[in-house]
Amino acid sequence: MFAPGFMMNAWTTATIVAVVAGVVGYFVVLRGSAFPAHAIPKGAFAGAAGAALLGINTLIGLGVFSLLGALGIGAMSRRGRRDVVTALALVVMLALGAAFLSRTTEYEPEIYSLLFGEVLGVSTTEILPVAGLGVACVVAIALIYRPLMLSSIVPEVAEARGIRGYRIETGFLIVVALATTMTVPVVGALLIFSLMIGPPAAARSLTSRPLLAMVLSVVIALVTVWAAIALSYQYNWPVGFFVGILGALSYGAGRGWAAWRRARATRPGALTATFGH
Amino acid sequence: MHQVYTAIFEPGFFASAQVRVAVTIGAAVAVVCAVTGVFTVMRGQSFAGHALGDVAAAGGSGALLAGLNPLTGFVGLSVVGAAVMDLIGVQRVRSRDLATGVVLGAAIGLSALFLYLTSVTGATTGAVQQVLFGSIFTTNSSTIPAVAILGGIAVGALALVCRPLLLSTVSPDVAVARGVPVRLVSLLYMLALAVSVGLSSLATGAILSTALLIGPAAAALRLTKRVAWAMCIACLTGVLAVLLGVLLAYDSYYWGSGHNGLPVSFFIVSVVFVTYLASGLPALRADRRRQPAGPATAADHDKIAA
């Protein structure tokens, strides 16, 4: 299971992906950006189909489409409801993807692996770009940490301090797009979403302290991914299945823990302490 | 004149049984989605609307694997997903996003497994494409009655709770004060949404189910603040988008020399998206004339309530 070669590559890339998903996902959950976090990777899948059609590197297709998706959602949500424009941006990208697919002779396993990932098929040369993009994501989050945090928790105060909400939103979506570009070839367009939601949500129900929650979110994401790979190795079922189910289970466990603690605590402040704000 | 006519309607368009089935199912789905979609957009639950499509697709792939009727899988799992979302907090605005996301994440994991197992057993080819993208051109005409009946149930359920649903959508506090069973109404709405989305995912594929649910309704709600009007406009837009999309997809087969057409979902989504963008123009012009107003949603709600 830990033999050098493809398994080692799988462990390395999955670890990088889990760290990034844990950090970025914390803000996804905090900001209530689950829909864009689902739409950008899923729409970027169309970019991979387009890249296959043109015969260029998949990463370029993914990058272009996820960036266009992020900028499109950011720009359109100034003039419409955010969830509506996210849905429309997503279907437009998917429709383009369907058009690209109808033109290619791409066969089914490749579509499947783009959607659901192929972490066991990562080659050594793919690790470096993934690591580079991962570092870029974490650095970007660190750079906009304070305004991002402020605008996520108290948007009104952030606006009053001169932080433009839509600029932060667009910047954050670009980080999601970056994370997407690096993770889609590895864990697939659909599963990065499970990693960005389950672990951070569980972490948030365990603590309301931001940095601790972020660390916990990374830890839970790591455990999820490692367990998923081990289980997948053992039972020969897709990694994606275990990531999806474990992600949901960790959220359920977090909710259960919070409810248990609430039931035990009789202090009236306990409820607000559990949910933060 | 005849040349223009044949340029618009390529030979065999009206004679094709496939086209007739596609137009019938597409139009029926468009109407059901438009009615449900108006509530979905007003309640800000586009994410749930889209997620249920993916949940339904997971059910569809499970049914494919188990050899069940796909309709059972699509609508069944979608309804279960909606119930779970409602249970873990889709009715509260703050936790709604998360509840939807968690259910969606689990459903995606399930589709990964089902589709993998389907491809391993080799029972069906093209399962991934069929379940995830779908196409109204490949729909069997025998699904028409099921689409009509389930669509009727969804619309009927919404009509039944129309007034309390509208009140609890526009101002939940007033609804609670008036003794509206908000929780029950919300659950009923989620179930109606699940049935319509599951149905349209089966009939038209996951892409179109979201496009037809959100696009026409959102465009209509930007044009009028009256709910009944918005439903009429959304139905009309949705049906026209389906007709135009099917026509263009049929014609695209004759474009160029390659003789491989573009998918119908591509055209329908394009029409829907252009309609949505165009629906923003009146507000844009009005904004230019006076000073820019505050965030649209709050103002919209006040107007609907008035």
Image (tube, helix red, strand yellow):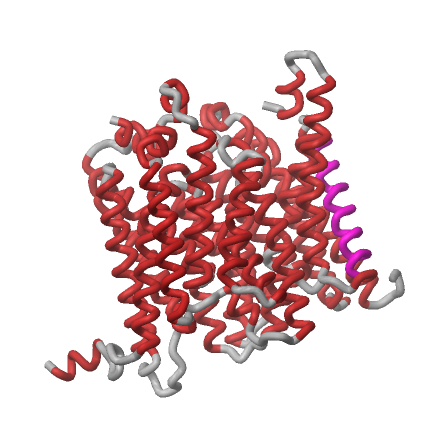
Residue pictured at 34% horizontal, 73% vertical: B249
Please identify the dominant SS of the magenta region.
helix
B197 inside magenta stretch: no
Locate residue B299: give its quadrant. top left
Residue A92 shows up from this direction: no
Would you say A196 lies left or right of A93 here? right
- Rendered location of residue B28, percent (x, y): 32, 59
Residue located farthest toward the bottom when viewing the structure as drawn: B257
Residue pictured at 24% horizontal, 31% vertical: B291
Would you say A58 lies left or right of B306 here? right
Residue located farthest toward the right when viewing the structure as drawn: A3
Residue A135 shows up from this direction: yes
Residue pictured at 71% horizontal, 30% vertical: A206
Q: Nearer the viewer, residue B101 or A143?
A: B101
Residue pictured at 40% horizontal, 60% vertical: B146
A212 inside magenta stretch: yes
Residue located farthest toward the left when viewing the structure as drawn: B1
Would you say B236 lies left or right of B127 here? left
| Callout count | 0
Q: Is residue B57 above or below residue B226?
A: below
- Rendered location of residue A95, percent (x, y): 43, 64
Locate residue A200: give its quadrant. top right
Would you say B286 lies left or right of B22 here? left
Task: Report the span colored magenta.
Answer: A211-232
- Rendered location of residue B30, percent (x, y): 33, 56
Q: Is residue B236 above or below residue A164?
A: below
Q: Nearer the viewer, residue B191 or B244?
A: B191
Q: Is residue B107 above or below residue A95?
A: above
